[in-house]
Structures are given as structure tokens and as C-alpha cells.
Image: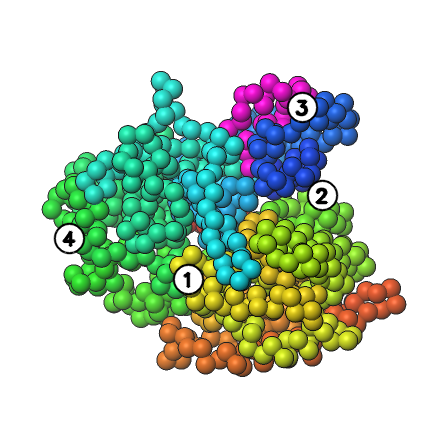
Amino acid sequence: MIDPSVLELLPPNLSALARLAGNVWWTWNEGGESLFRDLAPHLWRECLHNPLEILRRVAPDRFSQLTVDPSYVGRLEHLSRSFDDYMQQAPGQHASIRASGAPTGSATWGHLHLPEEAAEHPVAYFCAEFGLHESLRLYSGGLGILAGDHLKAASDHGLPLVAIGLLYRNGYFSQRIGTDGWQREVYDDADFDALPLELVRDAGGSPLLVEVPIRGRAVRIQIWRADVGRVRLFLLDCDVEGNEAIDRWITAHLYGGDAATRIVQEIVLGIGGIRALRALRITPSGYHMNEGHSAFLVLELIRERLLRGASLDDACAWVRERAVFTTHTPVPAGNDVFETSMMRDCLQGYLDDFNGQGETIFGLGRRHPGDEFEPFGMTPLAIRMAHSSNAVSERHREVCARMWSPLWPERSVEESPFRGITNGVHVPTWIAPLMRRLYAEHLGADWLERVDDPDLWAQIDRVPDGELWRIHSLLRARLVAVARDGAEQQWRRAGESDQLVRAARSILDPNVLTIGFARRIAGYKRWDLLLADMDRALALMNHPERPIQFVFAGKAHPRDNEGKRVLQQILAWRGRPELLKRVIFLEGYDHFLGRKLVQGVDIWLNLPLPPLEASGTSGMKVIVNGGLNVSVLDGWWAEAWDGHDGNGWAVGEPWDPASPRAINPSRDRDAADVRAVFDLLEHQIAPLFYDRDRAGIPHGWVTHMKNSIRTLTAAFSASRMVKEYARLYWPGTSLNSR
Ligand SMILES: *Cc1c(COP(=O)(O)O)cnc(C)c1O
């Protein structure tokens, strides 16, 4: 929310800054970031890229300077006009768009493909985390970032969507690495007044409250609104006066707690989310459970029908017609289960509304409904109650069909109704501004509107090799600068020696083949493979003609001591001179660092243990920036790699669904995969990268970059993804007549 005293200070011709800061639209549109950064570059970093915070803190005489700077004022006017135009094309504005005589080009995909009524009944998209920008710390990793990208793409394409999530006071943790190499977690208190959030109020001006029953107590929830372009995101917050102290903590931490914390958070998200929609007078036409955390919403929908006199069967059928579910991981930690006793305890009282059928309800959350010893699983509940259950890649669909086959005892695995809608990334969010301009110049100013059109990318050869290479090399140099900065800051903060802090200024080399490896530090991501053959790694890094260098980032879950130990081993190289120039681990992998990494690397490396990577999205972000993927054939890469090393490289054998270990992988393949990675780097990748013409351009490499851009950008864009989901959201419309 904008601080009123800030508004008073802003000169009239700069007042649009406040309006822009109130909607995260600025984060993915050209010129948004630079407008806020140019207010005061140092302060921008100190404010953690939070525009409302910088507007609060910038010195008044800086405003006096800018108010008479025609270039700055012009940029601001241009951006605020684009924002206004964008917001006018809200879903449902069919009539006004036609009446304005605007060219049909300004109508969105939603205007062209969905009936006007769809806007009155949006789809409600539920998720426990949303990764929109580093300044809004409502996410931990891939799931949240994917959900954030989904909202942005839905906004761009005019899909009528509202989103429901939780507002975490402390969010996920900030990562701090001590001089001992051990990860520590720091939780900061968010200042909601400095975030682009509006507390939702009732007609009388008091905060709009809803209540959910937890352990027989009524817990009050207030609702905040964040605007993501044209999509409204409602965030639920239990830190409300009148709640018992312990209940005010429910929405403090993201994924911090044990099962007892998670179940109450999930009651708030699912049951509270439906109640919030009712209080907001929004009547969705459908409900998308993005991961099982929100699946309690189906209980509330069933309860509503029962209270209106429906039978349990009819209530379930009603819900099933409207619910869509996406599961995001086969790893047990991502599929919450709760003991029946805990369910009874937390939902006491609430279950009274189910006409004595509480035990039947518990069966909905089990693979085998009659097995009263089986705990209640959020994933089975969601699968049973959705008309469409989705995996996030083709490979993941095959895995889910096996994993969840007990839910369809009458069907074979081949007949599983699971669908695969492969994830995609929001290109305007992840692309480097320089690349954006390069494409605009050579592919047409409207290229972003056609980002999911393969015909657009078929023309990538219009971009001259030399220019693509020059821009890419600039972006690599920028990443090196970001790494030096980051290293200096993190080492100084940790209390490392002056010598090491000084050395930060000269780590890495802007001209060396740069490999990025950033992901959660979890067992199946196999970070430890990097340590498996240190001698060979050292030799490759310090090769006299064809050196390589690594940039690492990632967090271990606060309770994952095994992960922290692996990280500590990786960090043991600090101070070893032969490595200092070639490897850096950057603290605090977040949206910002994610962008800089995917924009600057030559190679993005991914070594998960098949088949545990459901999709993975970080590798998709490098494509449009010209980076190349080297990955195990799992998740998205199993369907992306074109098989003859034209658009990247594959490590090791693909997963074999017929193998007895199909869904219980063992790590037998580790040694072979390590060898395969180093063989690729040594014999194919480095030689191709360093094979230059007289002007220093590696044409073979650039051909690979173009192959990757040509064959992958459209298919792995969030534009493609949300349009596929639209067919599930609005099943009766013309979308499905083809
Ligand atoms: C994209 C992204 C992720 C998810 O990437 P994976 O490939 O699934 O590991 C996690 N964290 C951040 C900060 C990201 O940008």
C-alpha cells in the first residue's frame, strides 16, 4: 500500500510512480525496473528491489531533480500509458474494446476465445506459494515461481482468473552461510505496509473477515489483495486481533513447520479460501488446486452442497465438474499426509456438517478408502475430486499413472486418466532486457505476443550470429559482475578474512565457458555428484586453452541436515587458490539471482535422479536467453531434447518405465552419470565453445543456441501452458471444438 506521506512528496508529473508500484506488472514490462532503480541505484539494492520502499526512502531533492529531467519524465509517461492501456483490456471488456475501435490486435486471447460471461465467473487458482518477484517473499522455489508465472501469463492473455494464497509474515528463510560453511536461516518480519497489498474492507470500512474452525476454535482470517496485472491475488492472513496467540502464527512461515502446522495452514488455504471468495462475492466457475496443499477446498465445497440438501454423491459430482488439480512432484515430502487422529482433532465440529459421513470423507483421501489405518493424503483427495488431474510433463504423467494407479483399481496403468500439461515459463519475466530488444529488432516489435508460436521462432536466423553472440557475451560478463558483488557482500557479512573479501573482486572470468547449477539442495537433485570426481573437475576448470567455471546457488530445507552437509562439503574449497577463480556458490537463491543466472550462463546443468524431477523449470528460462541445457533425460528435458545434440545435451540413459525400480529409483547410476557429464564437457561442449572464427565468434556454438531457441521457446512458454489449462477451465467453450 502506498504511504500517503509519500504521495504528498511526489511531484505531480512523477505521481504515476506510485500507481505503477502498486501492481507487480512493472516487474515484467520493459523499462519498469530501470525507472525505480534510477531513482537511486544504491538504495534500490538496499530496499531489496521494493519500489514502495524506495519511494518512501528516496531523498526529496532527488524528486526535485527528476521532475525536471525530460528523459526520466518521458520514460515514466510512456510506461504509465502502456500500463493504463493494458489494464483497460480486462477480461469481459469485449464491448468497450469493440466500441473503442481499437485494432483487434489489442484484444487479448481471452477476448477472442472466451465468451464475455466467463469474466463474471473466473477460475479460482489456489496455491500455497506465489513467486512473483524477490520483493514479495511468498515463495520458496519452483512451485511458487511456476504459480507466479501462471498468473502473469493468465493476465497477459486475458484469462479471467483470481488467485488465492497465504500471506506469510516471515516468508521462507534468507540463507546465510557461516565461515564454517554451514547454512543458517534468517527470518525477517515483512512490513505489509511497504508491499503492494491492500487490506480488503467491508462496506463499513472494517477489515473483511472470514472464519475457519480449527480444533474447535474459530480462527479469524483477514484478506489482502495484490494486483498481478489484470489478475487479483487474494492472500489470507491469520495475524488478526482476537485470535489466540498460537493461531496468529499460522501464516507466519512458509513450509517451516511439522505436519501439525501444515494441516492448519492448509485448512486456512482451502476452507478459508472458499469462504474468502464467498465474502468477496466472487462466484468462480472452476477451482484449480495447484498442488495438494489447497485440496481441503473440496471439503468446503461439499459441505456447502450438503447444507443445501444435496446428497453426498451429488455434492461430490458437483465439485468434480468444477475442480482441476495439478500435482508437482512424486517425492513424498511434496505429498502431504495426515494421520486420521490429527484430521479428527483439527476438524472437530466442522465434520458435524457432513451428516454423519465424516468417515466417508476420510476415505476420499486414501488410496484404499476402506483402510482406516491409511493416513489422509491431500493428493488422493485432490485426484478423486477433480475432473482433470494433471502432471507437469509427459514423463511425469507416466510416473503419476503408476504411482496413483490404486485410485483406479478397474483400470490398467495405460488407461490412467492422468493428463500431462508440461510446465512453461513466463518469457517477459525471465528474458534479459538486451535480448528482448534484440528480438524486437529482428523478429518484430510484437514478438512477445507471439511467443508461443513456433513460426515466430522458425525465423531466428534473422538474428545475425555476431549480434546474438555479442549480447550473450555481455550478459555473461554481467553475471560475473553480479557474482563478484554477491561474493564480496556475503563474505564480508559472514566475517571471512579481508584477503578473501578482497579476492571476491577477481573471481571468475567473463570470457570463460560458464556453467550454472542452481536448485534446491535436496537428495534427488544430486548436488553431491559434483564432488564425485574432484580431480577431473579441477583439470577441466583449469584447462590451459578450454577452461570452464561454475556458478552455484540453492537452499537446503531448514530441517535437512544431510543437504546442509553436502553444501558444507561443496563450500570447503573456499580459499583454495586454484578454485577461487573458477567456482562460486552464491547465497540466497531467489527470483533476482534466478534471473541473473539464467540470463548469463552458457550451460545450465541439471542432474536429478530419474524419475523424480517432475518437470523442472529453471532450464526453460535459459532458452530464450541463449543458454544451452545439459540435463539428465527427466522431467521436461525428456520431451525437449531432440535426440541428436542439436538443441542441448543429454546425460545418461532415459528412465525405463518397465524397470522394476521404475518408481523406487536407486542411485546405482551415479558413477555413470558423473562420467557422462565430464565426458560431454571435455569432448563436446568446451571444444565447441572455444572454436572461434577470426572475429571471435563460435559459429558452431551459436548454431546450437539458435537450435535451442527455435525448437524450445514456444513449447516451454507459460503462454502455451495457460492456454492448455484454459481448455480444462472452460470445457464447454469453442476452445475445445477443434
Ligand atoms: C525457476 C526457479 C526454481 C525452480 O527451478 P527448478 O528447475 O525446478 O529447480 C527455483 N527457484 C528459483 C529462484 C527459480 O527461479
Q: Which residue is mark 1?
A: 560
Residue 308 image point, x, y percent = 19, 36
- Point 24% across, 48% down: residue: 316
Residue type marked 3: Pro
Q: Secondary structure at mark 2?
A: loop
Q: Which residue is mark 3?
A: 60
- Point 66% across, 75% down: residue: 538
Q: Which residue is mark 4?
A: 359
Q: Earlier in the sequence, mark 4 or mark 2?
A: 4
Estimate how packed mark 1 is, as few (under 14), some (14 to 19) or many (20 or more) residues with alpha carbons within 10 Å. Answer: few
Q: Earlier in the sequence, mark 3 or mark 2?
A: 3
Of the residues tagged 1 and 2, which is closer to the observer? 1
Task: Give 478 or 24, whichever is nearer the viewer.
Answer: 478
Q: In this rendering, does residue 245 appear at all? A: yes
Q: Quadrant of residue 603?
A: bottom right
**Label 4, label 2: how far apart the Cα atoms are:** 59 Å
Q: Which residue is mark 2?
A: 445
Residue 638 image point, x, y percent = 52, 69
Q: Is mark 3 within 8 Å of ligand 1?
A: no
**Label 3, label 2: how far apart the Cα atoms are:** 37 Å
Q: Earlier in the sequence, mark 4 or mark 1?
A: 4
